[in-house]
Amino acid sequence: MRVPSLYRQKKLQVLLAGAAIGFCLSWLLFLYLFGAMQERQAALLEKHKKTIDELKVQLDIWQEEYKELNKKNLHKLTVQEIEIDIINYKKYGIDDAQSIFSAKEQIKKDLSVLYAKDLETVYSHKELIRQTIENKTLKINKRSYSLHVKEWYFYTTVHIQLELDLEGG
C-alpha cells in the first residue's frame, strides 16, 4: 500500500504552514505575556518584602518602647482596690455577717484616700496607715473592739488582714 503524496496539495501545505507559524507566534506571545506578568509579580513580591522588613523594624521599636514603658509604669502602679479581712471574729462570738461587713466597710471608708495613689507613696506611709487602723475602735453588737494589723500586701490591690481585740480586756 502506498501513502498518498501530500506535497502536491497546496491548500494543505498552506494550512500546515499557517498552523506552524501561528503556533510559533502564539508561543512567543505567551512567553512575552507570561514574562511580563512574572516581572510584575516579582516587583510586587519585592515591594511586599520591603514593607515587611520595615514593619518588622517598627515592631521591634514598638516592642522595645513598650517594655520600657512597662518598666516605668511598674514603678508608678496605683492602688485600685482595698481588701480587708478580719480573721478572728468567731473567737468573740460574732456570727453576724452583716456586722463584719459593716466593720470592713468602715475601715475601707477610712482608707479611701489611698485609692488612685501610687504604690510607692502608699508603701512609704504604711506606718501612718497602721496607726490609722489600730487607733480605730469598732462597735459590734454593743461591744468595743480594737484592731491590730496581722499582715498586709501592697500591689494594685492592698490586702490587709486584721485581728480583733476586745477593748479594755
Image (cartoon, helix red, strand yellow):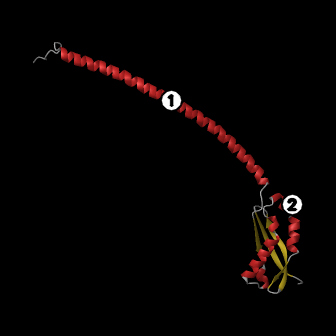
Residue that sits furthest to the top in the current view: 8
21 relative position to 138: left or right? left
Percent coordinates x, y for residue 104 in the rendering:
77, 75
Residue at the spot x=19%, y=18% of the render?
12
Tell me: residue 121, above or below residue 141. Answer: above
Q: Residues within 10 Å of mark 2 (few under 14, many from 20)?
A: few
Percent coordinates x, y for residue 89 in the rendering:
77, 80
Amino acid of disc 2: Ser
Percent coordinates x, y for residue 138 in the rendering:
83, 80
Amino acid of disc 1: Ala
Q: Residues within 10 Å of mark 1 (few under 14, many from 20)?
A: few
Image mark count: 2
Percent coordinates x, y for residue 116 in the rendering:
78, 61
Tell me: residue 37, above or below residue 154. Answer: above
- Residue identifier under label 2: 124
Quadrant for the C terminus in the image:
bottom right
The answer to which of marks 2 and 1 sits earlier in the sequence is: 1
Label 2, label 1: how many angstroms apart (C-alpha)? 63 Å
Tell me: residue 45, above or below residue 113. Answer: above
80 relative position to 53: left or right? right
Residue that sits furthest to the left in the current view: 1
Splitting the image into 4 quarters, where does residue 166 fall?
bottom right
Which numbered marker is on residue 8? none
- Residue identifier under label 1: 42
Give the structural element (helix, strand or loop) at label 1: helix
Residue at the spot x=68%, y=43% of the render?
62
Give the structural element (helix, strand or loop) at label 2: helix
Splitting the image into 4 quarters, where does residue 113 fall?
bottom right
